[in-house]
Structures are given as structure tokens and as C-alpha cells.
Amino acid sequence: MPNRNPDVPDDVFAGVLAQLNHFVRTRVVPRELEIMITDSIPADLRKQATDMGLFGYAIPQEWGGLGLDLVQDVEVAMALGYTSLSLRSMFGTNNGIAGQVLVGFGTDEQKARWLPDIASGDVVASFALTEDGAGSNPAGLRTTAKADGDGWILDGSKRFITNATEAGLFVVFARTDPKPPSGNGIAVFLVPSGLAGIEVGAKDAKMGQEGSRTADVTFNHVRIGPDSLVGGDGDVGYRAAMTSLARGRIHIAALSVGQAQRALDESVAYASTAKQGGTAIGDFQLVQAMLADQQTGVMAGRALAREAAKAWVENTDRRIAPSAAKLFCTEMVGKVADLAVQIHGGTGYMREVPVERIYRDVRLLRLYEGTSEIQRLIIGGGLVRAEKKKAL
């Protein structure tokens, strides 16, 4: 794949990717059970991730990050997807939906204030968009930001906020005008976690992804200054949300490919060694058919994620391709994980077997950053609108 990022040449990126794969396969994979049982990422693994620059791999170099573009991000995501998804979640918001709002829409002063600490991992940034009635569709937001002097007063509640319990900065989406004459009346604010009136709930108990942390966040008459408004523009919010989510969908697609590859590898290894009636089950044609379906899904997903990232970087498709990649890859990994459990039989249903954890972990991928249903609406609606424009 030709390099499209002059800031990180191919040979340099190859070294970064090799180091990352080594870290994932030799340091993290052997401790997946520990992560699952303790529901936390060990401190030494967090330090190693920090030292490798993983908290800022997608942050521009001028702000202390590695400066990887989305084509390279996809390769990183596939590598990280090979192990417990909670590892990636630890620094995913810094590089993705939270950090990219600042990278793409922040003022120079806001970038200088926050991005170096985000890139180093000294600050964990949380993307505070989702709330009751507003998840995949930000237009339903009820959190408000009311002008007060030269600042704002923030009121409202957010749900399922990743890394909320560790956050040093909340990137908060709020409605500034309930009935704007134009646009959506949604703005984005940079809210330090230590301000009076912010309440972070208890860590959510989830189906899977042990080691990752989500929680509710309540903003009760939180006073923030004028420098908190992202881009210094109240109209930037909705566009920032949509852009950040679309970019993140390609990342999630690639992450799904990594998990699918792991489930496939576990399936092949088990089918080659487990025996039924003295014969390796991998010699049975029906098992081979399931492996074939897994392999086909992985290969198709990998190609689609890479193609969507290329289209994003070249700015040829930043709407339909991200949704198509996320829809296919997250649905694909669910099927691959299900087949992995089937191939393992009863063993695959046991809690400490990798494919059981993968089966639970990947279910979330079809939900966040836009459900599969939302992706279908974006794709279908986008195609119809494009065709209608041709007729004008």
C-alpha cells in the first residue's frame, strides 16, 4: 500500500506496527484472562502503552503525537483488535472521537492547551455525546449550554461515556439554541473534569469488554469560560460530531477485523487439534465450511476497511464508505465469533476460553458510534440523495 502520510514514512510506520504487534502478541494476549477477571488494565501494560506513544498515535506530531493518518490508523486498529478490546478502549477516545474533535475543529489555543497532554496520556479525553434519546442521532440532544456573561452554564446528563471515570477532559455536546434559525443549535465544549457541578456515576457493569470503563456523567449548573467553546464557534458542534463519528466508524471496522482474525486463528488451532472419534474435527467438511466462511469474512472486511480509509484520506468519500465499512465489518465479526463458539462446541461456552470472551466483546461493536440500523440509513439515504442530485 503506497504511503500517503509524509509525516510518517513507510519504513518508520513499519517499525511502529512491528513493535505494536509484538506488544499485543507477547505482552497483552498472555494476560487477557487477568484483564477479564480483574476488570482492569494492569498498570504496567498502561505504562508500556504510554511509553509507546499509543495515547497519541493519531494526534499530529506538532502536538506531541505520532501523527498517523487514517490509512495507518486502520493497520494499528487491526493489530490492537487481536487482543482484549478494553486495551484499545483505554486510549481510543484520545486518538479518536474526542481527540479528533480538537484536531479538526479546535482553535490553535485550544490545541496547544490540550493536545500535548492528550498525546502523552497525561490527560484522558472523553467524548460526551450520548444521552437518553440521543445516541446514534445527535439531533435529539437535551443537554443545554446557556450563555452567561462571557461564558456558559452547562446542564444535562450523558450516558455510557467511555473513560468517564478517568477523564481529565470531557468533550461535551450541548444544545445552545432549542429552535435555531439555521443549523442544529448544537455546540461542543471542552470541560475539565474538576469543575464544580460535574458528577461521574459508578462504573457500568457491562456484558463484555471487561477492563474498559463507561459511566454516566451529569453536568449540574457547570460554569465554563468562553475559551471552552470548540473552535470559538457555536455552529461547529453538529459538524464536529458527524465528522468525528464518521472517521471513528472506519477505525471500528478495522478493530472488528482484528477481532475476527483472532477468532479465526483460535478456531483453526482448535479444529486442528480437537478430536472426535479419533479424527481432528478440522478434517470434517462441515467444520471446514465454517472456517471458510470465517476466512472469507475476514478477508473481505480487511479490504473494505482499507479502502474506506483510503477514501477518507483522499477525501473522495467521507460518508457512505465509513458507514459501509462499519456495517459490514461489525456484522461480520459477530458472525465469525458465533462460528468460533460453534467450532469449539461446549468448550467455546466456557468463560475462560478466548472465543467466549470475543463473542461477548464484539457485540458492542454493532451498537456504538452508530448502530447497524443507522449505518443502513446513512448508506441508503446517501445513495438516493446522490441520484436525485444527478437529475437536477
Image (cartoon, helix red, strand yellow):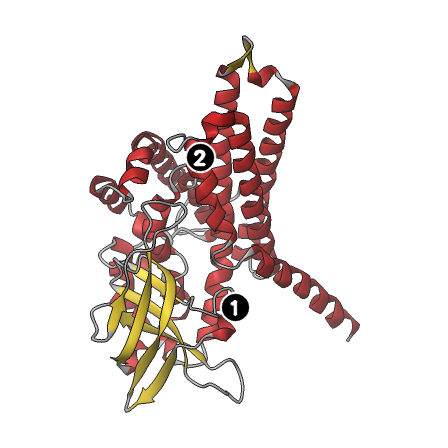
Task: Pick the residue in front: 240 or 131.
Answer: 131
Would you name the residue on which mark 2 appears?
A: 356
Q: Is residue 120 left or right of residue 161?
A: left
Task: Pick the residue in front: 263 or 295.
Answer: 263
- Amino acid type of the residue that numbered disc 2 sits on in the rendered structure: Glu
Kindly state the secondary structure of the residue where label 2 is placed. Answer: helix
Residue at the image position 36 percent from the left and 80 percent from the top: 232
Among the two numbered marks 1 and 2 on one chain, the one whose residue lies closer to the N terminus: 1
Residue at the image position 28 percent from the left and 72 percent from the top: 191
Task: Pick the residue in front: 78 or 35.
Answer: 35
Would you name the residue on which mark 1 appears?
A: 137
Q: Residue 12, image x and y in percent? A: 37, 41
- Amino acid type of the residue that numbered disc 1 sits on in the rendered structure: Asn
In the displayed structure, 275 sits above or below 118; it is above
Residue at the image position 25 percent from the left and 44 percent from the top: 46
Determine which of the numbered discs, if any, sits on residue 73 in the image.
Answer: none
